[in-house]
Image: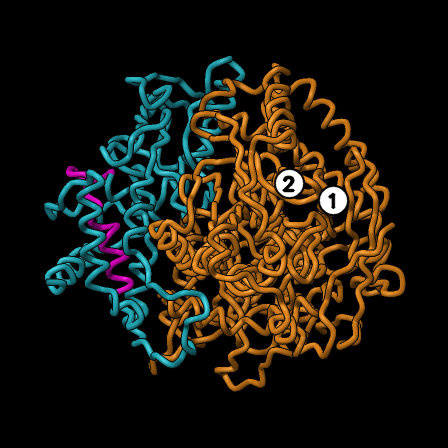
Chain colours: A orange, B cyan
């Protein structure tokens, strides 16, 4: 086991980033134009990074699988983006946001990275406002704020229920400007299928042109993965249906360690599964819990309509169990509590797998117009999906797979264990520990892209200024291209009877059952076996229609599902290894008498970083010990 | 329920393309329109027929990637929804449903129901932004923005770039798309510095890319899944006149 060096700068927490910037190596503006950077993905992290790097003078090449770089799933982020402006005068500060994230993440995140994320949060708001994001405003014309789950201050900036859309489009527009200026080049409808490593350094990628099917080579001095999370491994999730884990897996197989893959967030407020045909689950922003009250009937199996259930017959279980935070407990706590009530038979709706989120009191207290102003777009969205009017009836909600806290291991520079390969945004692991707090994802993604990577990547590229343009005519590119082609041809040659989607559904079911909100050793072992069997069945019986050299969406899906099997293995292996409960990772063997998560700081206060050793069932564990110099890990209580 | 689908099939850009009819049994009213197409495709694959290619991603009406012409209307008969949000409950047993891609010179068909909307990106590239480099921004509250203006800018900013407006327009005009971005940015003090150049560049580019002119029929507003208002076009015209 090697010792992972996170390269955390010395000095007091609040001075680390300033000191780093003062001593970081710089690239002369005249040299930047000779350096190429590949950015894969263009969400709030990728687009902001690509635009900022191009503004600095680097040559940037951006790759997305969608038809436009405006579509990345950051646009679906609803509720907001945090910053420590303290506009509300409620004693907010960088330290407080840092502490909330560290505690919210159940003391499994890296102090220095989290503090930096908090420290630059205000710059992000400044940047977005300057780029035209129409954030909510007070009558004075100043910016409005709201509170969000897991914290007791109001630090969230928002644009109704479309904060992600507005912020991501601002970054997309900044990137568009650089494309017109010729500093950035966009490659749309490209699937990134492999990373190319030359002499130990990330030097390029292999893509498939999704229109022509052509396998293409692209080279650069450095490669940035802004490829999001792999929550779609559960099949049903709040993610876009094409979101996938193939970039993370490709990097992992080329030597990047994958950290804490089992730390996957199940979001508490989603529209429940309605039927078997469903292809995705729709998130209802956590901001709704500011004014909505969560409840189930006190009577088991009570199937009366909500309106007939009297006040004294309702169990506002979050307020009952967690009086200090009530409906604003963090996501992991809220999700488990909902599952617990439903498992006990108190769930509502036809399936019994839902709880109520009720706005009756909020509407009575604040008036219909105020509630409409705060949540109008979300209420409309809910009504479109379910046909139920939430102004009149309570919403039905249930947890769903949402966010991947784990991801590619990165050091303080956001560089992976492959020199020259960076991972930013949700694709890395560093800031959210075992549970992410609301409105901190847009913040982290934008921070990584606008303000961190453009600084840290210079530290690496400063040593590359003598390296000429990287040729794609090398044996490493040959091999990577061949491996990609072999895999695609193999998928096409199975000619079995079952579709990729049917396998994906079954894989998702296994993971959701045994490695979802609650896990135990027996179940995880069963899941490991079942995933292995399903993977074998896939490679014997998958049916992929169409050919290689055409637009072939089945082939795209098949490649992603093949990778999901390996991601699933890593999730389960990581979940088995972590014999404690922390944040979203709840091992039933490790809980308090009251059923709360029981962390084991003595043995598991580390980041589990997995190294590929030839096959995914047998990865090697590397530990990055988490050293808490500035906060004292405490028992996380929201009671 | 059982339905009959008449779907546009086109192998690639060069292919002439044609309608093909499929009968589909066992469709549930609980499906979304795209889940119905998923269901059709699973069936076609089992029968050894090439599945119907169509674009979609977020499937919650926000990414703008989907968008089909359904029974002669963009995104089908429901108001204010994207194709992915369209529910099969609006159809009934025995219905015949015609499905076509967006049709516009500026959006060539790539395959079946998949079109190339790259022209929208080109429109943004010539001016749909505020030129604020990273790091150059002043403190966010140093420039107050009227609440009303911020809200109107937000309403314009909710455009998802799906192309419904172009598809709905008999002239295949991109005026609603362009006007939404021009209005959003012109309503904010931060966007006013470049307002003149922005509107001129975007309109010139619109003409260059092969989009038609606006003849004020309002089909775009009627069909827009995000209900972007025609008043944006009025604002665009005002901004355009102001630019001279």
The residue marked by circle 1 belongs to what chain? A
Name the residue: 54% across, 30% down: A556
Q: Which residue is mark 1?
A: A571
Q: Are marks 1 and 2 on the same chain?
A: yes
Circle on res. A233: 2
Q: Tell me if residue A185 comes above or below residue A285 in the rendering.
A: above
Which of pointers 1 and 2 lies earlier in the amino acid sequence?
A: 2
Q: Residue at x 29, y 31 (%)?
A: B108
Image coordinates of residue A6 in percent, x first then y, are 74, 61
Q: Residue placed at 70% from the left, 41% from the top?
A: A199
Q: Is residue A90 above or below residue A104?
A: below
Instruction: Assign the C terminus of chain A to one quadrant of the image.
Output: bottom right
Q: Main secondary structure of the magenta part?
A: helix
Left or right, A495 with reference to A518: left
Seen in the picture, residue A626 relative to B69 is either above or below; the reply is below
User: Looking at the image, which residue is at 53% across and 77% down?
Assistant: A154
> Can residue A600 be found in the magenta stretch?
no
* A76 and A83: which is toward the camera: A83
**Observer able to see residue A308:** no
For the residues labelled 1 and 2, say whether their Cβ atoms are less than 8 Å apart: yes
């Amino acid at each position: 086991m090697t010792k992972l060096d996170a390269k955390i700068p010395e000095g007091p927490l609040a001075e680390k980033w300033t000191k780093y910037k003062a001593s970081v190596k710089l690239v002369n503006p005249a040299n930047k134009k000779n350096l190429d950077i590949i950015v894969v993905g263009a969400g709030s992290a990728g687009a902001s990074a690509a635009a900022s790097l191009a503004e600095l003078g680097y040559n940037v090449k951006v790759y997305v699988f969608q038809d436009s770089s405006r579509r990345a799933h950051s646009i679906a982020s609803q509720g907001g983006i945090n910053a420590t402006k303290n506009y509300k005068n409620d004693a907010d500060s960088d330290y407080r946001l840092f502490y909330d994230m560290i505690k919210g993440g159940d003391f499994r995140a890296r102090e220095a990275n989290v503090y930096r994320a908090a420290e630059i949060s205000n710059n992000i708001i400044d940047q977005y406002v300057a780029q035209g994001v129409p954030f909510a405003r007070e009558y004075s014309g100043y910016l409005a704020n709201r509170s969000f789950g897991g914290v007791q201050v109001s630090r969230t900036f928002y644009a109704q229920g479309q904060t992600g859309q507005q912020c991501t489009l601002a970054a997309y527009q900044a990137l568009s400007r650089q494309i017109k200026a010729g500093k950035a080049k966009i490659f749309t409808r490209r699937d990134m299928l492999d990373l190319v490593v030359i002499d130990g350094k990330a030097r390029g990628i292999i893509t498939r042109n999704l229109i022509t099917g052509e396998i293409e080579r692209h080279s650069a001095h450095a490669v940035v993965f802004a490829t999001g999370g792999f929550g779609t491994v559960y099949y049903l999730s709040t993610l876009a249906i094409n979101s996938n884990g193939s970039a993370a897996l490709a990097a992992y197989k080329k030597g990047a360690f994958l950290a804490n893959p089992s730390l996957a967030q199940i979001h508490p407020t989603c529209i429940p599964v309605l039927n078997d045909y469903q292809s995705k689950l729709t998130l209802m922003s956590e901001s709704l819990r500011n004014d909505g009250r969560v409840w189930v009937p006190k009577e088991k199996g009570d199937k009366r309509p909500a309106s007939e259930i009297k006040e004294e017959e309702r169990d506002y279980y979050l307020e009952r169990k967690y009086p200090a935070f009530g409906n604003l407990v963090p996501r992991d706590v809220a999700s488990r509590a909902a599952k617990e009530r439903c498992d006990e038979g108190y769930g509502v709706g036809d399936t019994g797998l839902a709880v109520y989120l009720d706005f009756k009191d909020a509407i009575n207290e604040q008036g219909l117009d105020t509630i409409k102003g705060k949540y109008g777009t979300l209420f409309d969205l809910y009504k479109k999906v379910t046909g139920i009017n939430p102004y009149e009836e309570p919403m039905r909600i249930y947890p769903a797979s949402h966010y991947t806290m784990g991801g590619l291991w990165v050091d303080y520079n956001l560089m992976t264990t492959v020199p020259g390969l960076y991972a930013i945004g949700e694709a890395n692991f560093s800031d959210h520990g075992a549970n992410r707090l609301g409105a901190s994802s847009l913040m982290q993604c934008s921070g990584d892209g606008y303000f961190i990577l453009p600084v840290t990547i210079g530290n690496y590229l400063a040593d590359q200024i003598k390296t000429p343009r990287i040729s794609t005519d090398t044996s490493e590119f040959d091999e990577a291209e061949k491996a990609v082609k072999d895999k695609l041809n193999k998928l096409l040659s199975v000619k079995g009877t079952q579709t990729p989607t049917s396998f994906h559904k079954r894989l998702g079911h296994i993971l959701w059952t045994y490695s979802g909100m609650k896990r135990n050793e027996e179940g995880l072992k069963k899941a490991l076996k079942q995933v292995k069997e399903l993977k074998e069945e896939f490679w014997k019986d998958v049916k992929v229609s169409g050919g290689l050299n055409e637009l072939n969406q089945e082939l795209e899906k098949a490649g992603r599902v093949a990778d999901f099997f390996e991601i699933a293995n890593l999730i389960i292996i990581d979940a088995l290894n972590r014999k404690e409960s922390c944040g979203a990772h709840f091992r039933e063997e490790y809980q308090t008498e009251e059923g709360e998560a029981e962390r084991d700081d003595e043995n598991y206060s580390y980041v589990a970083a997995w190294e590929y050793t030839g096959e995914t069932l047998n990865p090697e564990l590397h530990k990055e010990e988490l050293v808490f110099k500035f906060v004292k890990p405490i028992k996380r209580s929201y009671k | 329920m059982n339905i009959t689908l008449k779907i546009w099939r086109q192998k690639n850009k060069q292919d002439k393309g044609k309608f093909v009819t499929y009968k589909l049994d066992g469709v549930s009213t609980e499906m979304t329109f795209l889940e119905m197409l998923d269901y059709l495709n699973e069936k076609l694959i089992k029968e050894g027929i090439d599945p119907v290619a169509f674009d979609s991603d977020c499937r919650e009406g926000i990414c703008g990637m989907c968008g089909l012409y359904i029974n002669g209307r963009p995104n089908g008969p429901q108001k204010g929804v994207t194709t992915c949000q369209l529910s099969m409950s609006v159809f009934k047993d025995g219905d015949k449903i015609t499905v076509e891609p967006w049709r516009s010179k500026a959006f060539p068909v790539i395959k079946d129901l998949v079109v190339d909307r790259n022209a929208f990106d080109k429109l943004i590239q010539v001016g749909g932004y505020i030129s604020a480099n990273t790091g150059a921004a002043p403190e966010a509250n140093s420039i107050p923005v009227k609440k009303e203006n911020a809200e109107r800018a937000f309403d314009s900013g909710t455009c998802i770039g799906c192309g419904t407006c172009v598809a709905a327009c008999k002239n295949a005009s991109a005026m609603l798309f362009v006007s939404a971005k021009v209005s959003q940015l012109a309503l904010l003090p931060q966007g006013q510095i470049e307002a003149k150049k922005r509107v001129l560049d975007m309109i010139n580019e619109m003409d260059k890319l092969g989009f038609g002119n606006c003849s004020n029929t309002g089909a775009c507003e009627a069909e827009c899944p995000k209900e972007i208002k025609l008043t944006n076009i009025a604002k665009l015209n005002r901004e355009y006149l102001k630019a001279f």
